[in-house]
Amino acid sequence: MKLIIAIVQDEDANRLVSALMNEGFGVTKLATTGGFLRAGNTTLLTGVEDDKLEAALGIIEKVGKARKQMTAAHIPVSGMASSAYTTYPIEVTVGGATVFVLTVDKFVKY
Ligand code: 2BA
């Protein structure tokens, strides 16, 4: 058996929990904080049988993988009142999953 520890962005967490549970995987969701940014992220714990490991990792990759997304940037218009802004589209990277896979020595439920 393996234990997958997946650290993902909060915005991906609920979709990832649902996707894993829909495929029959058990999930524990922890509210965590990244050491570098000191910002909230989510850590998911999933225990899987060895022959299901790649299927679970595939779901995590599909849902949590970093991808490009268009968003609107708001910039002040120079020479105008301070409340005047213009918007233009910019591409940002969202998502991303940091994944550890550990071998489980023993798994019991009491
Ligand atoms: P990622 O490398 O994608 O890491 C995302 C989050 O995954 C991290 O959040 C941390 O919570 C966890 N994580 C990553 N590697 C880990 C490891 N080896 N052990 C345990 N947990 C780990 P943050 O620490 O807040 O980092 C957010 C992002 O800031 C990182 O994204 C990376 O792009 C950047 N970053 C992290 N440390 C950096 C550094 N020393 N210098 C420059 N950029 C850094």
Image (cartoon, rainbow, N blue to C red):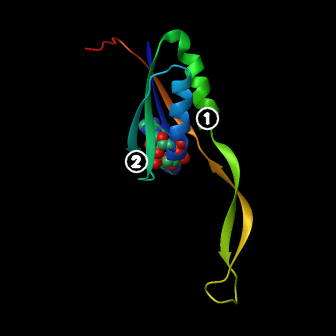
Whole-angstrom CA distance, mark 1 to mark 2, is: 23 Å
Q: As shown in the figure, which amino acid type bears the numbered disc 1?
A: Val
The residue lying furthest to the front in this view is 22
Badge number at residue 63: 1
- Does label 2 point to a residue whose CB lies under 8 Å from ligand 1? yes
Of marks 1 and 2, the one in the foreground: 1
Is residue 3 rendered to the left or right of residue 94? Answer: left
Badge number at residue 109: none
* Image location (x, y in percent) of residue 1: 44, 12
* Residue name at image x 52 percent, y 35 percent: 98
* Image location (x, y in percent) of residue 68: 70, 47
Q: Nearer the viewer, residue 63 or 67?
A: 63
Quarter-of-image position of residue 53 = top right
Q: Callout 2: helix, strand or loop?
A: loop
Above or below, 62 against 35 in this view is above
Residue tagged by mark 2?
35
Q: As shown in the figure, which amino acid type bears the numbered disc 2?
A: Gly
Q: Callout 1: helix, strand or loop?
A: helix
Is residue 89 rendered to the left or right of residue 29? Answer: right
Q: Specify few, some or many for label 1: CA neighbours under 10 Å numbering under 14, 14-19, or 20 or more.
A: many
Sooner in the amino-acid sequence: mark 1 or mark 2: 2
* Image location (x, y in percent) of residue 108: 31, 12
Q: Quadrant of the C terminus?
A: top left
* Residue name at image x 35 percent, y 11 percent: 105
